[in-house]
Image (cartoon, coloured by chain):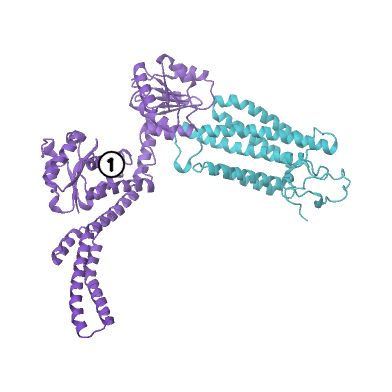
Amino acid sequence: MQPSMYTTMYSWSLLAALVLAFVYIVLSIRRPTNAIGAFLLPLILAMILGAIAVRSGEPFDRSEVTGSLWRPVHGGALILGTVAVFLGFAAALMNLVQEYRLKTKRLMTKEWRLPSLEYLHAMGRNCLVLSTVAIAMGLVSGVVLNVQRNGSVNWLESGIVFCAGLLVWLVLASVLEWEAARRGTSWSAYLNIASFAIVLIALILVFSTPHGRSRMGTSEKSNQPPKLSDQAPDAFSLAARPLR
Amino acid sequence: MIMHMIGCSHHQTPLHLRQRLAFSPEQANTALSSLKQRYPNVETVLLSTCNRVELYAAGSDPSVVPDVSFLQQFLLDFHHLNPLEYANHLKNCSDTAAVEHLFTVASSLDSLVVGESQILAQVKQAYEMSRLHQFAGPIVHAAFQHASLVAKRVTNETEIHSRRISVPSVAISEVAAQFFERFDDKDILIIGTGEMGEEALRYLQDAGALRVRLINRSIDNARALAAKFEKEFQGALQVSVELWENLPIRLMTADLVVSTTAATEPIMTLATFKPLHAKRKKQGAQLILDLAVPRDFEEPIGNLSNVYLYSVDDLQAACDRNVDFRRQQWPLARKIIAEETTRFLGDLHHRHAGPTIAALRAQANQIKLQELDRLKNRLLSQGVNEASLEEISESFERLVNKLLHPPLQSLREESAGDQQASLLIALKRLFNIKE
């Protein structure tokens, strides 16, 4: 029997890709003359490929915190943070291309028009701030989930360490961005690109650890495979997995 | 329908000859009045702009319209010009070609700057003047009103007007728009109050700018321009005047700088600008549009981070590309004009032939009724019943229709061609039609 939807890394990644695709549709409607798709669609495809790569992963352990509101908050905030970083990365790439073309006086053709430098810079900055807030929320909600389940938090658990490291970087990047933007919008773009690289590393590290998955031996059902019927079918919480 | 166009344009006539042939509105009125006195039924419009002088003369019949050589002589005589001097510089065309030329001019395909929008307003103005003074008649009304429709169709169905081609318009609408999302919250500085500066101000207002600072060596000129714009835009664009000495301070805070002075040396060197740039606190790019020739800002300033310097040469490339793009739209625009010319002439000829066709039908109907009455009286006396009489009446009707069908069909088929006028004349003579 296959795990139900939204309870694995696979479904979490697919949901993140779906959110990014939705953002792309909104941007395409609002700015139909801009070639945003050339930068966002590869990222959406990469997310889907990433999801396929972790398809065989174990489902998240939700048995002890079923019904907790912090679970969807945790999963949702991490999705939002990841999507914001991906979006910021796309804005940064567009910013660098736009800046290069404007500096070298190669004006955009009608068919290959990007948003204005001001818009791209604002988009990058907003993504950076949004991702910082979302990752912070994800971290806090994960801590609360751990307390609810275990009564304590293992601060050295890999998921918490990677997430906290990412948060520290994002806070630093958001603060540095103000000074970077004064020196040139490309500096701000580099911060977004670095954030993207760090998120990618954090995701790979988290996906390669047993973070959030069923803990054999700690549950009363440790000798039995987890019953999928135990998992609540609510859609959004699927993405959620408590930090340990 | 007869229509002649006689005139000159930038294509074949040098500026000094065009200037001497140009008409002020008063002169145009006088000239057309004088023509009307000699030819009371002629319909005329005189289009005189800086790039062309064209006289359109139309009428329903060749007898009411003066010929091309008369009209040519008339134009030259009005200004006491030597015909030999203009021998190779005046263009003329008639009927279909004249209509097509009018549509081409109104659609701005014949303009010096293809796609410029001013010419349509000038064509409308010339027609309006003619209409007000009753120089226009049904043909001119139809032709000039249709010209506006053709120009609108060319605008809507091609992209001939879609791209700007003057340096200030490209600078604001294409270059600055790639830097800034909006202009209402930007600190904009214009240096110089010349023609370019004034044009840039207009485009900035169009782009949504609310506040502009103006700096000029002569503060009186700057104040005069500011007052002019305040009045013109009724406060929608706030233009504040700054002293020349404040230029360095304003350069530190400006997001967009448009420089248009007539200075022979750069007003801003790299050495002067660099410390100002270092003190700049604002985030985001600083765009400098140097529209002056020679340059106002030294070229290396553009290498500083977050500073983007565009000179006239950089902008000219974009202008040239847009001009090329407009040229690419030509075949489609020409096709529209050809279609509309055919449609217009077809409609006009059809309308023109209407009274003749109606008269021909009425005449045939009258003959048919006379013959039917005569036959009915005789047949009734011979005891023929009503049903047979009805059948005979229908036969007469069919006979008349079949007889009239070929000539009317030929007339319809020729409605878009040049032969329709002669066909109509032939028809009137052959059937002795008096409308």
**Secondary structure beneath disc 1?**
helix
In which quadrant will I find the C terminus of chain A?
A: top right
User: Residue A211: image x %, image y %?
Assistant: 77, 41
Q: Which tint was used for chain A?
A: cyan
A9 left or right, relative to A189? right
* Foreground pick, A56 / B315: B315
For image coordinates 18% across by 73% down, the residue present is B370
Kindly tell me whether residue B218 is visible in this rendering. no
Q: Is residue B370 visible?
A: yes
In this view, B296 is above or below A107 = above
> Label 1: chain?
B
Q: Quadrant of residue B189?
A: top left
Task: Say if B111 sits above or below B359 in the image.
Answer: above
Q: Position of residue B85 (x, y in %)?
A: 12, 38
Q: Is residue B117 left or right of residue A214?
A: left
Looking at the image, residue A80 lies above or below residue B295:
below
Q: Residues within 10 Å of mark 1 (few under 14, many from 20)?
A: some
Residue A76 quadrant: top right
Task: Please report the residue visible at 60 percent of the width from the left and 31 percent of the height from the top.
Answer: A125
Location of mark 1 (residue): B124
What residue type is disc 1 on? Lys
x, y percent for residue B290: 40, 26
Chain B: colour as depicted: purple
Picture coordinates of residue A107, whole percent (x, y):
44, 36
Using residue A62 as the reference point, say whether residue B353 is left or right of it.
Answer: left
